[in-house]
Structure formats: C-alpha cells, structure tokens
Image (cartoon, grey):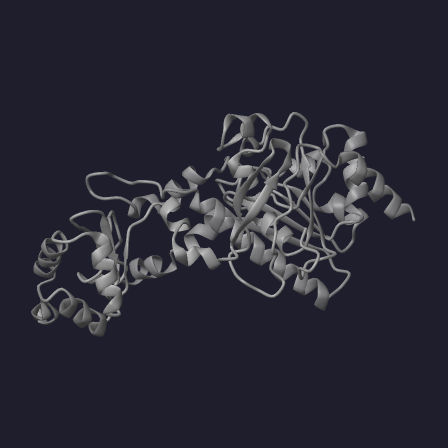
C-alpha cells in the first residue's frame, strides 16, 4: 500500500469480484488504504485467470488481475461456514469500509449484510455495487458489462447502420461504475470525518452510473423527441469538420468544432472556401478526398501545427509507446515475484504529491489469511 497516501490508516474489506468493485478498491489502495480481498475457497473469480500468458493464468495472476490489485492483501473465507463467517465479523470490527457486489439479498442470507456488520462496527461504511439497484424489476438479474452496455442504450448508439449495435471495445460500464464507487466511498469517508460515529449504507448501480454519463443525449431526446442512433464516427458536435477520416495510410480523427478551428482546418488543407460552405455533405465529401492524399501522421503533424485538434488513430501499444507517455506517472513497474517477471501496470490516472512512485505486488489467493485473522483478533481484544 501507499504509506504516504491520503487514505493511509483506512481499512477496507473488499468482498467484490470480477472488474468494477476490484477496480475501485484498487484505486483506493493506491491512495494508501489497507484493502483486504475476502475471497472464496477455490476462487471462482475468473479475473484471476483472465489475460496474459498461460503461466500467469495458472498462477491466478492474469493480466486483468494484475491491472487492479496492487498492494492489496488476500484472505480466503467460506462465508457459508459459521466459524469463518465469525472471523469476517471479527475482522469487520477493525474496518472502516466494507464493499460487496453480490446480488441484492445475498449478503444478508450469508449473515454479513449491513445490519450484521453495523452491530459489530457501529460506524461502518457499507457499500454495495450492483447491476440495477437494490429495488425494481431488474434487481435480481445478474449484471455483466456486455449486458449493461446493451440495456443502458450505449450499444444502440455505437456502431453504424451496416454493423448494427456494437459494444465499446473495453468493459467500459465496469470502469464507469468503478469510478462511481470510488467517488461514493471518498465522499462517505469525508462525511465520516464530519459526522463521526454514524454508519452509512451506500449503493452504486451500474445502470445508473452508465446512463448518467449519457445525460446530454437523454435531455436532447426529452426536449426534442429525437434519439441519437448508430452514427458511427459522427462527432458529438454535429459538424462535418470533425470525425474520423481515412488517409493514404492509417486513420485520422479531427475535432474542429468551433468556427475558428474550422477555418484553420480549411486553410491547412488549402481549401479555405470550405469554411464558408453550408453544405455539410459536400464539406464531408471534400475532406474525405483531401485526406486520402497523404498519410495520417503527416496530417496529424500539419493540422497540429495549425492548432487544429487532430491525431492519428493508434493502437493501445502505439499509444503507450508514444513519447508523451514517457513522463507519465500513471504507469509504473509492477513486480510479479511468483513468476520472476515485471510488467508495466496502471497506477492512479492523475498526478499528486502523494501519488505512488512504485507499485506493490498483487496477492496470491489467500496469501495473508493466517496473518490477517490472527492480527485482527489480537487488535480487537487488546
């Protein structure tokens, strides 16, 4: 953990699995929190075995797991076993936060719900991450990123008429919900400082987190009756001077949303007359023809020099290899001693005086069980 971080001294019991919850607690661990992963025996969290080499998967240290579990500790408890459930409640006495992402009602049936934990820790911050909320006709349904992309309206506006609805290329709902959970828990910790001694029951819905990101589209529909559909690479600003364009080699993205940017773009491509054209279709066709004459990198350099927002479309590997990323503190070396390897892994997506300068290893399954249980009981009884 980050001993200099603002959350140093905060203990989080993390009962979450897959992506959204562990991503959120991973961000808090990088801010200094002591995050204890409470994992089930014979871990069925597929993220431990997702991505990377076969050796990484076999070790339960897959690429997805490495990306969001730096500095955490891991214990294995079977919450269906009364004795091990009791161990968790003893551990809860030492915790500031508990986070879970089971379906609504499961933690209560297991005996580790909000009311049970509040009895042993009266000022607990108890957060639940779920797909659709604790109530409503969808509350009992399982929730996965792909399903949420479909049901939220996101897929219906992603893709082109020929492709039909398409998912965004990464599990974006998981990470949007994870960021919402980070904000929720940071707010709750501030509230605890203002009003100490009070328990807080928090809930984050993946559906709410995603749909609120689309507020501009929702209000547009509410007030005009018009619904954004499969618009491919059409720009959010609805201008023909923005979008993705094919070039002689590679693709180019441009965002010339303002009249001044559009004029600079037209001058840079030697077609100043296009800035006065009112035919959006004609403008788009002309620009498509122009950009096919040179490579994307040449256009990026030329347009950027003209103060027109533009970039060559890159792969993730190319983006991470860009000179701009060489000074980034968002990516740091992560040692994986179990496999005698080091990878470059994400840290906090911002810079701050207390941001970590190195990443702690991720835990193997149950690596800290005996030590954590023994120390928590000793702390409570001392």
Q: Residue at x 51, y 35 (%)?
A: 142
Between 193 and 319, the one lying in front of the other is 319
**Residue drawn 40% across and 56% down?**
323
Q: Position of residue 307 (x, y in %)?
A: 26, 70
Residue nearest the observer in this picture, 152 or 51: 51
Percent x, y of residue 193: 72, 65
User: In the image, what residue occupies the spot 64% across and 36% down?
Assistant: 337
Determine if residue 186 is in view.
yes
Tell me where residue 313 appears, x and y as whole percent: 29, 50
Quarter of the image for residue 367 reads: top right
As drawn, the residue found furthest toward the bottom would be 260
Left or right of 69 on screen, residue 372: right
Residue at figure coordinates x 66%, y 64% from the top left: 190
Residue 298's spot in the image, x, y percent? 21, 57
Q: Can residue 134 be seen in this view?
A: no
| Residue at the far right in the pictured view | 382
Q: Up-down: is 58 above or below 367?
A: above
Classify residue 47 as left or right of residue 380: left
Q: How many labels does the image show?
A: 0
Above or below — where is 344 with respect to 31?
above
Nearest the viewer among 145 and 325 is 325
* Left or right for 64, reference 122: left
């Amino acid at each position: 953990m980050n001993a200099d971080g603002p959350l140093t001294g905060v203990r989080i019991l993390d009962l979450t699995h897959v992506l959204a919850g562990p991503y959120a607690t991973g961000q808090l661990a990088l801010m200094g929190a002591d995050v204890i992963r409470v994992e089930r025996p014979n871990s069925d969290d597929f993220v431990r075995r997702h991505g990377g080499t076969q050796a990484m998967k076999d070790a339960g240290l897959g690429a997805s797991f490495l990306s969001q579990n730096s500095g955490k500790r891991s214990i294995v408890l079977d919450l269906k076993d009364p004795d091990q459930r009791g161990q968790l409640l003893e551990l809860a006495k030492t915790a500031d936060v508990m986070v879970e992402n089971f379906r609504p009602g499961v933690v209560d049936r297991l005996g580790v719900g909000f009311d049970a934990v509040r009895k042993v820790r009266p000022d607990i911050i108890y957060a639940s991450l779920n797909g659709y909320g604790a109530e409503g006709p969808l509350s009992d349904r399982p929730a996965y990123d792909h399903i949420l992309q479909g049901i939220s309206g996101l897929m219906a506006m992603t893709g082109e008429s020929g492709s039909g609805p398409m998912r965004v290329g990464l599990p974006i709902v998981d990470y949007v919900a994870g960021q919402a959970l980070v904000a929720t828990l940071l707010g709750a910790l501030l509230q605890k400082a203002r009003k100490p001694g009070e328990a807080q029951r928090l809930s984050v819905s993946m559906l709410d987190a995603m749909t609120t990101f689309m507020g501009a589209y929702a209000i547009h529909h509410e007030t005009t009756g018009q619904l954004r559909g499969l618009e491919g690479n059409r720009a959010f600003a609805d201008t023909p001077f923005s979008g993705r364009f094919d070039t002689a080699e590679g693709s180019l993205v441009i965002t010339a949303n303002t009249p001044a940017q559009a004029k600079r773009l037209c001058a840079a491509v030697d077609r100043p007359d296009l800035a006065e054209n009112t035919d959006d279709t004609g403008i788009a066709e002309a620009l498509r023809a122009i950009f096919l004459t040179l490579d994307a990198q040449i256009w990026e350099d030329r347009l950027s020099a003209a103060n027109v927002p533009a970039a060559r479309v890159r792969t993730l590997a190319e983006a991470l290899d860009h000179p701009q990323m060489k000074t980034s503190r968002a990516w740091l070396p992560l040692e994986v001693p179990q496999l005698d390897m080091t990878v470059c892994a994400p840290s906090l997506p911002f810079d701050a005086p207390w941001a970590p300068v190195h990443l702690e290893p991720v835990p193997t399954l149950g690596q800290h069980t005996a030590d954590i249980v023994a120390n928590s009981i000793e702390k409570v009884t001392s």
